[in-house]
Image: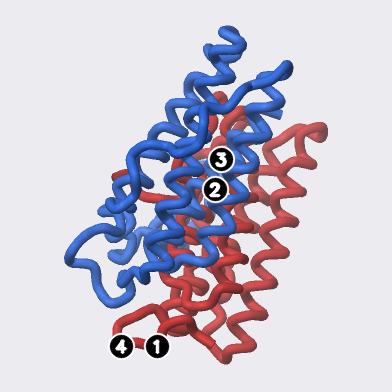
């Protein structure tokens, strides 16, 4: 134990780190499409449509990573982890929105002369979109969209 | 006014409970950044000071929100047990990661439990700021990957 540590407190793990891992978050892990979802998880048609729209936003971002990588192979290698995380976000969003269309309706994006700067703008736009959508959702959908928005803010920072 | 008053649905009670947990996390972060700053050199200390200041501001905002609702306002503890010894700048950065990730979990919980749109706005903004700081600390701590796709969410 570090001399800087001064228990008798319960410590971070009890007071802070586990504070958010209460049973309610099991819903988040399971996604919001569970048929056993409780009253708090009832989805209005407006919310379902809005979540499907965020799937399309994420599909556009995944396509943007591919387009930027195709335009600049060195960039593709540098952002491989970020692209993989964007893919994981898309997978989880699709799982939470089973009624959403699996294919993007938007045409493939073009990276332009500054692929990294363009990609960063795409990431920031997707983060803005998910953050705004999170506020209009509730329960597990709000948590998922808010988390993804935050993850993309982190990506934006890495691309700066 | 809450968005949904149906029995068992999200309401101000669920929201206040989650905000109370977030407040506890913010208290711990403010305290923890004192440790982080103390273990960093003078040149790097401003990063910890800025983070501490940000958490103080959120802490005060949540305290005022809960007090205004006449809900319980959890106090800071006198001290907290560190999850590991903090004896170097790398340790300090790793503690910064722990602090921000702990706070992120609490704010995702707020998003999950909030009834008010304004509370979700606060949660989304705070969660994003938290992840930006976490990325910087992961870099400083040499942790990879430095970004995470789902800050605050439990693994699926």
Q: CA distance from mark 2 to mark 1?
A: 27 Å
Q: Are marks 4 and 3 in contact (CB under 8 Å)?
A: no
Q: CA distance from mark 4 to mark 2?
A: 30 Å
Q: Are marks 1 and 4 in contact (CB under 8 Å)?
A: no
Q: CA distance from mark 4 to mark 3?
A: 35 Å
Q: Left or right: A113 with respect to A156?
A: right
Q: Circle 3 is placed at which residue position?
A: A152
Secondary element at tag 4:
loop
Quadrant for residue B117, please give it: bottom right
Marking on residue B7: 4
* Name of the residue lying farthest toward the bottom: B70
- What chain letter is assigned to the residue under label 1? B
Secondary element at tag 3:
helix
- What chain letter is assigned to the residue under label 4? B
Q: Colour of chain A?
A: blue
Q: How many marks?
A: 4
């Amino acid at each position: 134990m570090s001399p800087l540590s001064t228990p008798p407190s319960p410590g971070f793990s009890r007071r802070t780190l586990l504070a958010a891992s209460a049973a309610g978050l099991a819903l988040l892990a399971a996604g919001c499409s569970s048929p056993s979802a409780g009253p708090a998880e009832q989805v209005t048609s407006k919310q379902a449509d809005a979540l499907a729209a965020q799937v399309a936003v994420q599909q556009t971002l995944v396509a943007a990573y591919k387009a930027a990588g195709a335009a600049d192979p060195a960039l593709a290698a540098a952002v491989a982890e970020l692209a993989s995380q964007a893919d994981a976000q898309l997978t989880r969003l699709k799982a939470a929105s089973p009624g959403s269309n699996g294919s993007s309706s938007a045409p493939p994006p073009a990276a332009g002369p500054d692929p990294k700067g363009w990609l960063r703008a795409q990431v920031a736009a997707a983060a803005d979109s998910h953050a705004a959508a999170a506020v209009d959702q509730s329960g597990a959908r709000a948590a998922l969209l808010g988390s993804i928005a935050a993850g993309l803010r982190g990506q934006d920072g890495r691309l700066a | 006014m809450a968005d949904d008053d149906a029995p068992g649905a999200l309401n101000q009670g669920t929201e206040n409970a989650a905000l109370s947990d977030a407040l506890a996390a913010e208290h711990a972060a403010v305290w923890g950044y004192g440790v982080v700053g103390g273990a960093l050199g003078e040149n790097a200390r401003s990063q910890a000071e800025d983070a501490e200041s940000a958490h103080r501001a959120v802490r005060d905002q949540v305290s005022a929100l809960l007090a205004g609702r006449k809900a319980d306002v959890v106090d800071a503890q006198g001290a907290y047990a560190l999850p590991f010894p903090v004896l170097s700048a790398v340790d300090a950065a790793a503690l910064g990661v722990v602090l921000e990730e702990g706070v992120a979990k609490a704010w995702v919980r707020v998003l999950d439990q909030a009834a008010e749109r304004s509370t979700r706005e606060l949660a989304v903004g705070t969660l994003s700021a938290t992840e930006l700081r976490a990325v910087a600390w992961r870099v400083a701590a040499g942790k990879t990957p430095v970004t995470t796709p789902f800050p605050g969410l439990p693994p699926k």
